[in-house]
Amino acid sequence: MNGIIIVNKPQGYTSRDVVNKLTKIFKTKKIGHTGTLDPIATGVLVVCIGQCTKLCDLLTSTYKEYIATIKLGFKTDTLDITGTTIETKNIPQLNKETIIAVLNSFLGSSIQTTPIYSAVKVNGKKLYEYARQGQNVELPKREINIKEIKLLSFNKDEITFKTTVSKGTYIRALIDDICQKLNTVGTMSSLTRTKQGSFTIEDSSSLEEIEKNNYKLLSIEEVLTDLEKINIDDNLYQKIKNGSIIDKTFSSNIACLVYKNKIIAIYQTYDKDCQKAKPLKMFIN
């Protein structure tokens, strides 16, 4: 079985839980997801099966869209409502104009500190393991990009917003930074991933639907619509089948090579000779 399924992850499941469940449903261990969602979060989880697991890193790098809700006035150790309250603070008089201005201040590139309760590894150990053992560790920082951010609703102690962010952005950490600029504290009370790249929540299937065989299995061709396509002949097919370096005939950095209407490989510019191309992903059985 080869293909991509868009799963609507339920709350309370880890991304690994979803993969484990699908492993049993499809009776295969060759399954991987393309972007972890916290257990509290719901929404789009792109799952690759069979040969399509080779696409996981490519699909992970795309922008993601979320709808998040902030509960103001208290902050937890995990930065979401599953954690223990570590700080409380009065909520100042806020209005939509002030909130919108603060949200807009995060547009573009910035440096974000990774939350201590995350699976990012430092010295071979996951950050949440340091947190659970009460050990201090320097939290890594990374550059993120906020492409869009929009206020959806606001009342005296709750803010809901939609945002489109780059790979590696922690919405919990973004919320913490937003609350600091609002001169208060807050915690993430809900999170839904509504889009990842071109995959939307409207196209997703629940685990219950998948168990009932009610889902769409996307092909490699349906997923890689944005990449340049190069049709190849029988002679070039034999070279590609052997993983050979070939003359570069595509204009972008990477491209799909198509043989008899099927994508058989993804090639990229050869780093030692920009006139040549080398294999990046192979899909030939």
Image (cartoon, rainbow, N blue to C red):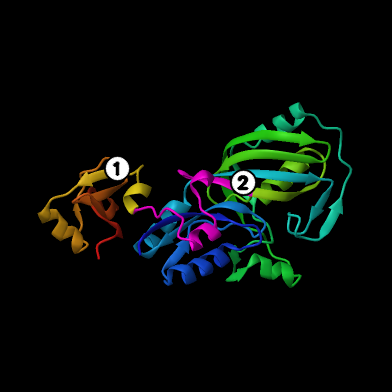
Q: Tell me residue 182's x, y (percent).
A: 78, 38
Residue 16 is left or right of residue 39, and the answer is left
Q: Which of 282/46 is in front?
A: 46
Q: Tell me residue 88's x, y (percent).
A: 87, 50
User: Residue at the right extreme?
Assistant: 90
Residue, x 83% and y 57% (percent of image)? 85
Total label count? 2
Residue 26 is left or right of residue 267, and the answer is right
Q: Which mark is residue 228?
A: 1
3D distance between C-alphas at marks 1 and 2: 32 Å
Q: Which mark is residue 205?
A: none
Residue type pointed to by label 2: Ile
Residue 46 is left or right of residue 98, and the answer is left
Q: Say few, some or many: other residues with alpha carbon within 10 Å of mark 1 (under 14 / 14 to 19 / 20 or more).
A: some
* Magenta region includes residue 140: no
Of pointers 1 and 2, the one earlier in the residue sequence:
2
- The residue beneath circle 2 is 111
Residue type pointed to by label 1: Glu
Q: Tell me residue 35's x, y (percent).
A: 52, 56
Residue, x 76% and y 29% (percent of image)? 96
Q: Quadrant of residue 120?
A: bottom right
Instruction: Magenta stretch: give its range.
Output: 192-219
Q: Is residue 63 visible?
A: no
Image quarter where the C terminus lies is bottom left
Image: 22 above or below 43: below
Residue, x 16% and y 56% (percent of image)? 237
Q: Quadrant of residue 236?
A: bottom left
Q: Secondary structure at mark 1?
A: strand
